[in-house]
């Protein structure tokens, strides 16, 4: 009888489920750090097929999570550690994109959403982090896509300047809501 009560309690409208995906774990260790320079000024992570090319395949991480009947919040986070190793000031920008699984290029603004963006300026020899963190709600246009649980997520890192070393320290998606509501509140 106690087991049945616990199962029914888990099905109530008060049961909150959180699905967390560590996107960083899907990026090969060798790709998590490197150097941005004039010849390699834009980086897309993760590269889903490992070919190092962008635009000929969907790229980003394809997720197929349980859909949440009631999505309360969606949180996206990313953190880069940066060091300007060049001789001129540099600016590094970071964007987090989400798109439907069918979107052929999730960074072009067609069908995809730029959920977060930010940038940091670095003088020669300067080290700084670039951190993005946002909790989305229904007012955000990407919220409906995240609610389905089926989407692609990716990071775009861009450089304006000479040479910057980077290390991706964090990238994650967290969805909190209710999977179903069998018993009313």
Image (cartoon, rainbow, N blue to C red):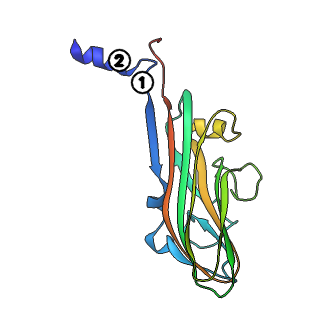
Q: Is residue 163 above or below residue 166?
A: below
Front position in the image: 85 or 52:
85
Front position in the image: 85 or 14:
85
Q: Which residue lies furthest to the right in this view?
A: 110
**In the rendered picture of this protein, how many numbered marks are placed on residues?**
2
Q: In this view, does 91 lie above or below 86?
A: above
What number is the disc on residue 9? 2
Which residue is disc 1 drawn over?
A: 15
Q: Residue at x 44, y 28 (%)?
A: 16
Q: Quadrant of residue 8?
A: top left
Circle 2 Cα neighbour tier, 10 Å, few/some/many (<14 / 14–19 / ≥20): some
Q: Is residue 32 above or below residue 124?
A: above
Q: Which residue lies furthest to the bottom in this view?
A: 87
Q: Which residue lies furthest to the left in this view?
A: 1
Q: Where is residue 162 in the image (x, y as percent from the top left)?
A: 68, 83
Q: Quadrant of residue 40?
A: bottom right
Q: Residue at x 36, y 22 (%)?
A: 10
Are the residues flagged by discs 1 and 2 in contact, CB closer than 8 Å? yes
Circle 1 Cα neighbour tier, 10 Å, few/some/many (<14 / 14–19 / ≥20): some
Say which element carries label 2.
helix
Say which element carries label 1.
loop
Q: Where is residue 173 in the image (x, y as percent from the top left)?
A: 52, 48
Q: In this view, does 119 lie above or below 123?
A: above
Q: Earlier in the sequence, mark 1 or mark 2?
A: 2
Q: Which residue is drawn at 53% across and 61% down?
A: 79
Q: In which quarter of the image is residue 141?
A: top right
What number is the disc on residue 82? none
Q: Where is residue 178 in the image (x, y as percent from the top left)?
A: 49, 27
Front position in the image: 131 or 27:
131
Q: Where is residue 153 in the image (x, y as percent from the top left)?
A: 59, 53
Q: Quadrant of the N terminus?
A: top left
């Amino acid at each position: 009888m106690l087991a049945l009560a616990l199962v029914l309690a888990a099905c109530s409208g008060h049961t909150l489920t959180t699905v967390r995906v560590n996107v960083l774990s899907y990026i090969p260790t060798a790709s998590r750090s490197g150097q941005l320079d004039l010849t390699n000024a834009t980086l897309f992570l993760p590269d889903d097929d490992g070919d190092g090319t962008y635009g000929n395949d969907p790229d980003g991480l394809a997720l197929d999570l349980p859909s949440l009947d009631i999505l309360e919040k969606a949180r996206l986070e990313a953190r880069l550690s940066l060091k300007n190793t060049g001789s001129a000031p540099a600016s590094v920008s970071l964007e987090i994109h989400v798109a439907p699984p069918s979107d052929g290029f999730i960074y072009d603004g067609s069908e995809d959403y730029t959920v977060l963006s930010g940038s940091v300026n670095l003088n020669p020899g300067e080290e700084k982090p670039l951190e993005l963190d946002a909790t989305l709600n229904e007012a955000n246009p990407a919220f409906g896509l995240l609610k389905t649980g089926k989407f692609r997520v990716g990071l775009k890192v861009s450089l304006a300047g000479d040479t910057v070393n980077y290390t991706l320290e964090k990238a994650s998606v967290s969805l909190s809501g209710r999977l179903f509501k069998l018993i009313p509140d």
